[in-house]
Image (tube, rainbow, N blue to C red):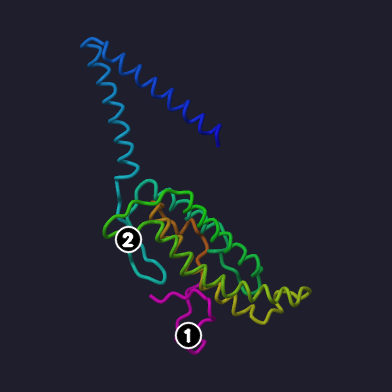
Amino acid sequence: MLSGTVFRLLGATLIGALTGLAVFSLTQVTSRSLFAITGGVAGAVAVLAVQWYQRTARLTEVKVTVPQLSELTFTVNNDSRQVAWQMFVETVTRVSTQPLASDQGVVREALTSMYGLFATTRETLKASRPSAPVPGGQTVEYLAITMLNQALRPFLSHWHPRLQEFERSRPESKESEWPENPACRAALRELQRDVYDYAVGFARLAGVREAESLIGSVPAPRVSDDGPDGGNNPPAGSARTRR
């Protein structure tokens, strides 16, 4: 701690000395050179101001349909577009948006992938600067946190303990022998549909064109309440979206 304090004091002393020397030098400059120096400083300040404006002040409004909610207006700048692009890449390169047929894949791998998406989203938000609040518009952080709390968290908190208990109680059994395997896969398909919508939302905020073609596989449509199951509710913890 002491060495760090000494280092900061030395740095501050050096910066102060250089600043004082620069001010003194300017006071010794004649009129023509002073105008040239002043103009150069003003130009540099203008460039920095333009860059700041492009990064933080130039806002764009984008309308996105959010699962579990409705169509909302989001306000984005260059920084938030970068965050949205990172979130888009994370969501479309995982099992989170890729179909898992009833006779293919492993549910454990799918849950692990969902956990990875949850963790990566949280770390991305922690590492980025929060968007400035704008009246009448939501931010990319709002979309990401809604995906975590409204889609991923309910599914994982419901199905992960159940699968974990089966694996612990019957370590030699195949996953296909898990009694709740069909219900979990059905809930997973509902969650994938929601995450797909979030991925499209992130793409729109990031300015990605033809996001659907980039994602490739489109999850199966959601099962309606009056579908072939006779109107039964989905298993608890599923991410069914009601529009």
Identify which amino acid the numbered label 1 is placed on: Gly
Q: Which residue is mark 2?
A: 63
In this view, the residue in front, 120 or 201, is 120
Residue at x-position 29% and y-position 35%:
49
Q: What's the CA distance linking mark 1 and mark 2?
A: 30 Å
Image quarter of the N terminus: top right
- Asked if labels 2 and 1 touch by Cβ distance under 8 angstroms, the answer is no
Residue 169 is situated, as x and y percent measured from the top left of the image, at: 74, 77
Question: How crowded is the residue under tag 2: few (<14 C-alpha within 10 Å), some, or many (20+)?
Answer: some
Q: Which mark is residue 227?
A: 1
Q: Residue furthest bottom?
A: 230
Q: Residue furthest front?
A: 2
**Helix, strand, or loop for circle 2?**
strand
Residue 202 is situated, as x and y percent measured from the top left of the image, at: 42, 57
Task: Identify the image quadrant of residue 164.
Answer: bottom right
Residue at x-position 46% and y-position 64%:
147
Magenta residues, start to end: 220-243
**Helix, strand, or loop for circle 1?**
loop
**In-image side of 151 versus 99 (left or right):** left
Q: Is residue 197 above or below residue 26?
A: below
Secondary structure mostly seen in magenta is loop
Residue at x-position 29% and y-position 55%:
134
Q: Is residue 183 magenta?
A: no
